[in-house]
Image (cartoon, rainbow, N blue to C red):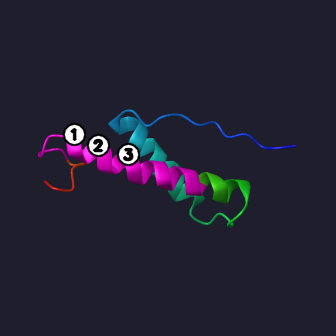
Amino acid sequence: MRATMDIKPIRSDADYRMTLVEIEGLMSATAGSAEGDRLDLLTSASMYTSSCLTRSLPSSSPWNSRA
């Protein structure tokens, strides 16, 4: 039987911060495990979302690395 993951889009600053907290909790996951797969997915989505968010955030935002 195949495991399923609860996948939700990162649409807000709060979603992004919650994703970072989850990533932190998964950092010791074993590669190839369900947790490791989730970590891979979340880090890929987080990196993509981060690049998209910083392009659309005001320069004064603390989430904008260009500030």
The quadrant where residue 32 appears: bottom right
Q: Amino acid at mark 1?
A: Ser
The residue at the point 78 percent across, 43 percent down is 3
Q: CA distance from mark 3 to mark 1?
A: 11 Å
Element type where label 2 sits in the image: helix
- The x and y percentages for residue 2 are 82, 44
**Would you say the residues marked 3 and 2 are in contact, meaning their CB atoms lie under 8 Å apart?**
yes
Examine the residues drawn in magenta and state their main secondary structure: helix
**Residue for point 38% across, 45% down:** 49
Q: In the picture, residue 12 is in which quadrant?
A: top left
Considering the image in quadrants, where does the N terminus appear? top right
Q: In screen coordinates, is 46 left or right of 3?
A: left
Tell me the CA gap for discs 1 and 2: 5 Å
Q: What type is the residue that disc 2 sits on?
A: Leu
Q: Are marks 1 and 2 in contact (CB under 8 Å)?
A: yes
Alpha carbon distance from label 3 to label 2: 6 Å
Task: Tell me the magenta residue range.
Answer: 39-61
Give the farthest residue toward the right.
1
Three-letter amino acid code of the residue under disc 3: Thr
* Residue 43 x, y percent position in the rendering: 49, 55
Q: Verify CB contact (< 8 Å) between mark 3 and mark 1.
A: no
- Residue 33: percent from left, percent from top: 73, 60
The quadrant in which the C terminus is found is: bottom left
SS label for mark 1: helix
| Labels 3 and 1: the sequence-earlier one | 3
Tell me the tag on residue 49.
Answer: 3
* Vertical comparison of 14 with 39: above or below: above
Q: Which mark is residue 56?
A: 1
Write down the residue under mark 2. Answer: 53
